[in-house]
Image: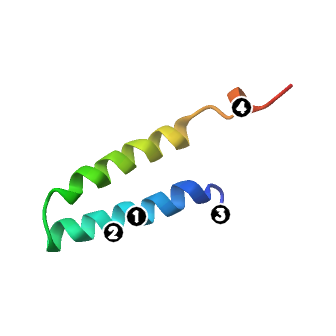
Amino acid sequence: MKNPKVFYLSIIALGFVFLSFYVSWYFLIGAIIIMIYNQRELTRKKDKFKKK
């Protein structure tokens, strides 16, 4: 697994999508927030955090 943080957050987002179909559509808001966070996590530059 390359990035476990993104993997676990994606599983939680899928849970929110599932809950939005069976409980309330408001759970989609949480899923969208997690997806935006995951996108930022994946597109962030790796060189910024490396020490030289």
Between marks 4 and 3 in the image, the one whose residue lies nearer the viewer: 4
Looking at the image, is mark 3 or mark 1 earlier in the sequence?
Answer: 3
Q: Are marks 2 and 1 in contact (CB under 8 Å)?
A: yes
- Residue 1 drawn at (x, y percent): 65, 63
Cα separation between marks 3 and 1: 17 Å
Q: Dot 4, crowdedness within 10 Å: few (<14), some or many (≥20)?
A: few
Q: Residue at x 22, y 55 (%)?
A: 28
- Would you name the residue on which mark 4 appears? 49
Marks 4,1: beta carbons within 8 A: no
Q: From the viewer's perspective, is residue 16 above or below residue 43?
A: below
Q: Earlier in the sequence, mark 4 or mark 3?
A: 3
* Residues under numbered marks 3 and 1 in contact, where contact means CB atoms less than 8 Å apart: no
The figure's colour scheme reads rainbow
User: Which label belongs to residue 12?
Assistant: 1
Q: Residue 29 at what x, y percent from top left? A: 23, 50
Q: Which mark is residue 45?
A: none
Marks 3 & 2, CB-CB < 8 Å contact: no
Q: Amino acid at mark 2?
A: Gly
Residue located at (25% from left, 71% from top):
18
Amino acid carrying mark 4 in the image = Phe
Identified by mark 3, the residue type is Met
* Residue 46 figure quarter: top right
**Badge 2 element:** helix
User: Which residue has dot 3 on it?
Assistant: 1
Residue reaching furthest right? 52
Q: Could you tell me which residue is drawn at 38 percent across and 42 percent down?
A: 36
Secondary element at tag 4:
helix
Q: Is residue 29 left or right of residue 43?
A: left
**In terms of sequence position, does the residue under pointer 3 or pointer 2 come before the other?**
3
Which label is found at residue 15?
2
Rendering quarter of residue 12: bottom left
